Amino acid sequence: MLQSKFRIQTLAFFLTGGISALALGADLDFFESRIRPVLVANCYECHSVEAANRGKLKGGLLLDSRDGIRTGGDTGPALVPGSVSESLLLKALRQEDLEMPPKGKLSDEVIADFSRWIEMGADDPREHAALELKSTAIDASDHWAFQAPIKPNLPTVNNSKWGRSGLDRFILHQLETRQLSPVSPASPRVLVRRIYFNLLGLPPTPEQVDEFLKASAEDHDSAVAKLVDSLLESPHYGERWGRHWLDVARYAEDQAHTFGVKKRANAHQYRDWVIRMFNEDLPFDEFIKYQLAGDLMEGESDDRFQQFSGLGFLGLGAQYYKNSDKAQAEADELDDTIDTLTRGFMGLTVSCARCHDHKFDPIPTEDYYALAGIFNGRRYTEIALADENVVKAYNGEQKIIKELESTHKSSLKMIGKELGRQKLNQVSRYLQEGWRMTALKSQGVQISHEDFAKEVGLHPHYARRFRDLLEESRKGDLLKRLPELEGWHQVEVNFQEKPTLETLKVPKEIVALADQLQLLVDDAEKAFSQIEVEKAEELAKARNAEDRLNKVMGKMEKDQQRLLKNIWYDGHAPFYASEDDVYKNFLNQEQKEEADLKKAEFEELRKNGKPKYPVAHAIQGGGKAMQVYIRGNPANKGEWVARGALEILGDQPRPSDPEEAKKYSYTRLDLAEDIASAKNPLTARVIVNRVWQWHFGKGLVASSSNFGLLGDRPTHPELLDWLTVNFMENGWSIKWLHREILNSATYELSSEQHSKNEELDGDNVSRWRFDRRRLDVEAWRDSLLAISGKLDPAMGGPTFDLKTNKPRRTVYASISRHQLDGMLRIFDFPDANVSAASRTETTVPQQQLFVLNSDFIIEQAKAFAKRVSQESDDLSGQVNFAYGLAFGRLPSEGERKLAEAYLGTEKEKDDKLSRWEQYCQALLASNELMYLD
Amino acid sequence: MTRRDMLSRTGGGFASLGLAGVLADQGLLAAESPLVPKAPHFQPKAKRIIHLFMNGGPSQVDTFDPKPALEKYHGQRPPGAERKTERRTGGLFKSPFEFKRSGQSGIPVSEIFPEVAKCIDDICVIRSMHTDVPNHEPSLLMMNSGITQPIRPSMGSWLCYGLGVENQNLPGFVVLCPGKPVVGPQLWSSGFLPGIYQGCHIGKLDPKKIVDHINNKHLTPQTQRQQLDLINRLNDLHSGQRSGDDQLESRIQSLEVAFRMQTEAPEAFDITKETKATRDLYGEGQFADSCLTARRLVERGVRMVQVYYGNGQPWDDHGNIENGHRDKGRKSDQAIAGLLRDLKSRGLLDDTLVLWGGEFGRTPVSEGGSGRDHNHHGFSVWLAGGGIKGGMTYGSTDEFGFAAVENKVHVHDLHATILHLMGLNHENLTYRYSGRDFRLTDVHGHVVHDILA
């Protein structure tokens, strides 16, 4: 029996006793007069049994008993008798680490009292008897979702005429029990539209409607079955149903924050994979495994796209800004993974257990870290989807490009090094002139470094660098690098009048410092040359000229090495010239042209070479067991936790010994197999329920990503189990499930009113009708394109920006976590930073502004009008055609009259749309095009 | 009275009344609309808020928290001046600005804010603010959404969610920011709250561009009215066969409201409608115009207006703080004081909360000799109006102004206090998502009662 697994020990505290007489000691008076009143007044509000009972206990710390104060809370014992320095309580009062009380520091006298009390041994009369620990447990042993589903018998019903399938029997049974009756079926015309939108997210063409009506008149049930079969074979099916899954997978191409994050150029591979797997009806358990561990599944598939692209589920996860608090950011990234996979696959809100045991479900905080450990330390990576040869060829070419580039750069760099070296005998001169430049500048004499250099015969490049080196504001850097110049900035000159280039003399102290440095540099240069000669043999083995110089430098005596580096060799040194500097300041025209040619060689290759092969975004590494982060704080680590499945799902307990816990192996593949298992009571139920929700608008379990104790109960538990077991028996086939649902009488119900049902079950919990509902933004936008005739049926590939109004299906639009497209946002597309169980539905004027004024709708209205005008010459035929395209039916008499009246009027001079265009926009803007019966 | 009768009768008074109020009174706004005004948890002191956001992080020791000890220790790095911030810093650096005691309260204000100084008796300066990290992105997010990661709703979105929207012709949360601040859209994101609570970002104060698709470029207003009547007739025929469906009815209403927004919303942004005297009060420039627009918006029932000082992170004076801060003071001082005075003279300051401040402060130690680095240990913000005790300072930093020490106020506490003033208990303003009840203040936040009037 698994009963014990469903219990989590949580602690509650009950006040039972008073003060023990035994505790009365010599220092009791001190406690009673100086300590207790302060604790009562300032601490008990958040740190007492009373607070705990109110649910207001903070930090797990009780200060209203001796046990409590000595045991401490989440951060350890609050006090250690006799040791002030080890007592967190005192640190908190002194506001050193923690800051307590939060309302402000207590007076120094009070803090001194506490310090004295602790030193004296912290006598505390509030005895152990004051508290009794009593345990309560979350007893989830009979929670429905943790029981394995068992296929129930079909219930009995009175009305044997209604219903076509087992599914219908369950629905009818409940309706009859509740004195409800199913409404009449939807007309075939309504039904065909419903099925098209439902499976493809597109309206049927007038021809498709007619075809179905004809077939339905002959044999309705087989017409439906045939239609369903044929639409399930349409590639557009995957576009529709793949998108449903992408909501759960929080699919997006970028990251929420600004700095240092690039759009993942191959994100669409994951999207296309999901679409293809739906089209191919990959068994859903396999679908899960590929997404969690495609890279670890051996020999499953020789199609790299199939095997690796699903890893985008993990590989397109959150990346947060790590500049300020890296550990926290990494913990938040792990949380994104845990949250998405536990809610997405199992309908469990495991993230709630990140900071404390789950408050409602039997998920201890160790479970969270057992799962997190599976991913801890992982890196986002890319896996090539192309053939090995393609990858090799590309990488080979990239290597050549890199080599050409680096040869080019290093030859320029070496010129810079050589030029600088030749100047080393002029250190003193440049220093002195540098001093003059800074002095002139400080006295407000305007002269550019070019002019100055020209006047005194220096190279302007080095002159500028010496001037910058000697700026007063960079004094710190200068002295750190060239301590020989200590005193440089202390040399003061009294200027009687504004100096000029001609009159300004270099003070003798400066001359002395400069000359002295020159001597040292000369010595260092000599040493450098000597090494070049003495070690010539060894140096000949250097990879290239730069490597050779580096090697010589490495052999220098430390002080001389520092000197040369800081005057010549390093990037900040004044006699340094970078590749760019060399090119701009030192090459003549001919040399420049030569350099340009070399550069063009690799740039040309880079531009016109082989394109980068496609990759899957994935993760690698990970699997470092974790310690519990107490209260979710990465800086506050608790027990080691072995990697593993949730306690309620695992067959054997995880090892608890820290050393064993660290070593215990449980991989992503293990996790994937435990999730995608028929033994897991949640997984199959969760996806069956989602599919139901995507067909009917709401799930049998309304909280489709939360099957825990706080989630909704299934409205039809037996039906859910019956479908679930059948689903698994039928190879976890989503298409099987579609057929089961779509061929039912329940699915076929009309969306009409029924006053008696309405009264008893206004929310249609028992499914006595089909709920009319708004199309989601993808189906709505795509159907406008379909009606206007502009829809581009191309599948897959890189994303497009919706603002360009490209007529591609909305599923191919780029989805941003940083800034979601405005149209998607106002039409309730979910935030792609988190897994979405369902879409919120709002009706707000901003949506209607899009309908009235956007360029997109105007384009479609124009195209629609043009299409209609080409179809027929007479108005009546045109209106009929328009209605057929938009609504799959003919206009009513009233609608025909409205059309005639509107189209019979001339357009105003200032209107930029014809009457027909205006009219077509009105049809596109209508409720009938936005709500599905 | 039918819906359409009512709509045609109430035409003129929309802007100030707010259509929601009218419709709600008539029982005509669908109750489930996410935009209906909702009752607060308790009687609010403030009904709306203007956040003057000095993005980049103004220096507390150069604005509202003078520290004479900086003179004494100028150039030195005594104990207490060695806290870690983002970059390498040098010795203490005295403020290049004079402070003058102002108003009845005698609170010292830097010379860069001479006009704001005159309003100091309406202002409560919190000198003991602190936040988590010394980097822009996380701190901007913390100030706006109460968390350092970019995935949660912003305060303006929470307020719209908690209190609804007063004026259906205008967004409930407007962000006036020329260009785009660092981080950008996540700062006014609605996160997992419904998208309609997202802040409406307006980069350029062009009345025609204030809401997406507000402008009809194709039809005259008369023709568009005709077209909308046609849509309404079609929808009525459609609804006629589907009686009693609220969602169809609310979309019909929503179309009417959208139609009216086209004229009503741009009007709210049209500051040329203001008198010369009023415009003079605010002075000239982008920031002044934004402040004036903010007043027009809150006057019309917008719940929260955020006025960013500027594009990027303008207060981020790592170098030459003297010129930088003086210049930004010059460009904002009159407008801020003008806003306070204007709100006061219209009786709006009583129930409009004004918040001034950045995402963090700056170090009292120098960066590169003339600038200051980011500082999350301590900084100042101020509040005025709606329920705030004026003419007081609250809390304090250490002797150098580096870290908050007395009566510390974390950003969570500031949020809790703002929600409190708006009539919301920050612990009860929750949204169930992903199995959890989320809050703006997460598990933190204490209302700072001492600054409440």
Image: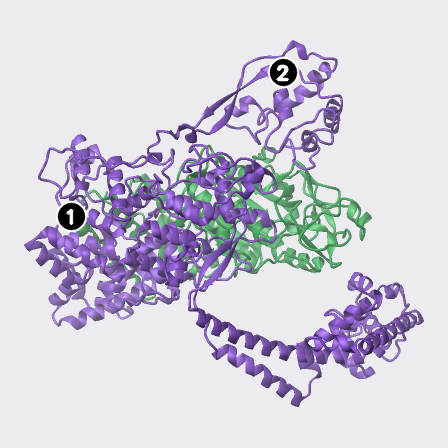
Relative to the observer, which residue lies in front, A436 or A428?
A: A428
Is residue A275 left or right of B299 when viewed as pictured? left
The residue at the far bottom in this view is A590
Splitting the image into 4 quarters, where does residue B281 fall? Answer: bottom right
Chain shaded purple:
A
Q: Chain of mark 1?
A: B
Disc 1 to disc 2: CB gap under 8 Å = no
Vertical order, A222 against A489 (above or below): above
**Chain that is green in the image:** B
Q: How many marks?
A: 2
Residue at image coords 55%, 28%: A57
User: On the image, numbered disc 2 is attached to which residue?
Assistant: A127
Q: Residue furthest top?
A: A21
- The residue indicated by pointer 1 is B241
Residue B144 x, y percent position in the rendering: 53, 48
Q: Nearer the viewer, mark 1 or mark 2?
A: 2
Disc 1 is placed on an element classified as loop
